[in-house]
Amino acid sequence: MTVVGTVLLIIGGVLLLAILAGKASGRIGLPGLALFLAIGMLAGSEGIGGIAFDDATVAQAIGIVALSLILFSGGLDTKWSSVRPVLWQGLALSTVAVALTAAVVGLAAALLLGLPLITGLLLGAIVSSTDAAAVFSVMRSRGVGLSDRLRRILEFESGSNDPMAVFLTIGLLSLIVDPNATVVGLLPMFLLQMVVGAVAGLALGHLAVRVMNRLDLAYDGLYPVFTLATALVVYGVADVAGGNGFLAVYVAGMAMATHDFVHRRSILRFHDGIGWLMQIAMFVALGLLVFPSDLLGVALPGLALALVLIVVARPIGVFATLGFTSLRRREIAMISWVGLRGAVPIVLATYPLVYGLDGASLIFNVVFFVVLVSVLVQSPLIPYVARRLGVDEPIREATRYPIEMEESSALDSDMVEVRVPDGSDAIGRKILDLGLPEQVLVVLIGRGRRFLVPRGATTIEAGDTLLVLSDADGLAELRRIVGGG
């Protein structure tokens, strides 16, 4: 067996195992990241795999590339129309709440671990960002949903709070390693990173759409490659210019999402797959980097710090920023509880290792332990907390149709699904007798697990889902006739 064959066998085997673990995670109520990390730890030098890996620089590089592509994918899948109503709440959570959380955890870390205050604040900054994707995976597996407003706030927060955590981490590291650095000097650095990152992402995102729509590539498969290259270029341009690359790629994805572009659906699916691949690669690499035996020595202080983060620091940050909004206290409490920690804190914990900071190993192990507690203890309780607070809603599963339509600005109609509710006047009537507007075309009918090709004589039944092609006026008239949403 050749070396290349062995390496490919190991990589392919780990990927397949991670995919199966992700499938199993839904049944046991844990985010897939916990099992991905476990796979990495089992494959490491102290696990059954025996793979020796302790290069923090390589792990950090993998993490940066993976996070960039994950954030770009998240931006592509974020609609500005859904963000606009919760923009200020999300920005407050991703900046002020992150800073308050970092400060409270930092003070606790200094006391619990006997660290200098600034080192404690560094640890607090590292664990200050959240991972809402883990939250929704748990709730989806347990059949628990949230209102549109709560979901939008959490999704926007998770996509936009990583840059603040990165800035705080790098800023505090510069204060520790550079005797000439000052707190006042961090303000211009913050403004530069955020402004340059946002402007670069916005400009390059809009430019990418214009270029892509005008290109006439010989092969359709090259368009997803174009957007992948765009994500990497956006991060690189922002970083070289002194901006925040993570903010840039997220904004670039959002900017592209506001436009129609060729092969939109296939590109979104491609980046969804790339996002999963990056999550697996990142979590497994970080799992390889940790030595499980080292976690035992930080178990007690790590558990105490995790509890401070979950029940003190996160609630203080959330209530301080959202307490004066129109959100109910129960909704704010839910946002407070679902602040799960994910891969970003572990990636940021590699920065002190790369910088060669005294106590860097302690910081990395404590952060890793805090993330594990958040995932293993906090996440399984999310459905229970949602029900106790009365903010849970049933999940409406999207119908998966056997046909697709590419979105295009050249078409003045949209493909929309309309459900026929119980008691609708359309029930028992033929499509021909409904008096539908001429611009409304019923393309397919979903009935239970079956799909029907509609004809004029097809009779409507309660619970049917009509897949229709229509403009806005025709859709409004159809909903009036059917009485569905």
Image (tube, rainbow, N blue to C red):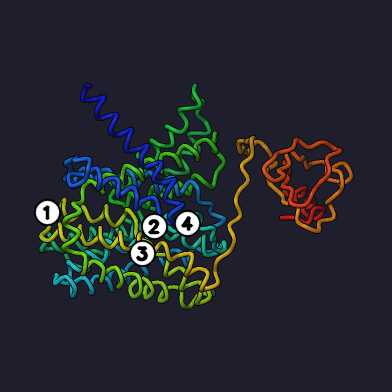
Callout 3: helix, strand or loop?
helix
User: Is 224 in front, or is 120?
Assistant: 120
Number of residue marks: 4
> Looking at the picture, does residue 286 appear above or below residue 187?
above
Give the percent coordinates (x, y) of residue 135.
44, 59
Q: Nearer the viewer, mark 2 or mark 4?
A: 4
Nearer the N terminus, badge 1 or badge 2?
2
Name the residue: 57% across, 41% down. Answer: 260
Calculate the distance from the C-alpha at mark 3 to the C-alpha at mark 1: 32 Å
Calculate the distance from the C-alpha at mark 4 to the C-alpha at mark 3: 16 Å
Name the residue: 69% across, 47% down. Answer: 417
45 relative position to 435: left or right: left
Nearer the N terminus, badge 4 or badge 1?
4
Q: Give the class, few, some or many, for how many residues have Cα within 10 Å of label 3's Cα (few <14, many ≥20).
A: few
Callout 1: helix, strand or loop?
loop
Nearer the N terminus, badge 2 or badge 4?
2
From the image, which quarter does the N terminus lie in?
top left
Give the percent coordinates (x, y) of residue 391.
54, 69
Q: Which mark is residue 356?
A: 1
> Looking at the picture, does residue 53 appear above or below residue 173?
above
Callout 4: helix, strand or loop?
helix
Calculate the distance from the C-alpha at mark 2 to the C-alpha at mark 4: 9 Å
Nearer the N terminus, badge 4 or badge 3?
4
Q: Nearer the viewer, mark 4 or mark 1?
A: 4
The residue tagged 2 is 131
Calculate the distance from the C-alpha at mark 2 to the C-alpha at mark 3: 15 Å
**Circle 1: residue type:** Gly
The residue tagged 4 is 136
**Circle 3: residue type:** Val
The residue tagged 3 is 377
**Circle 4: residue type:** Phe
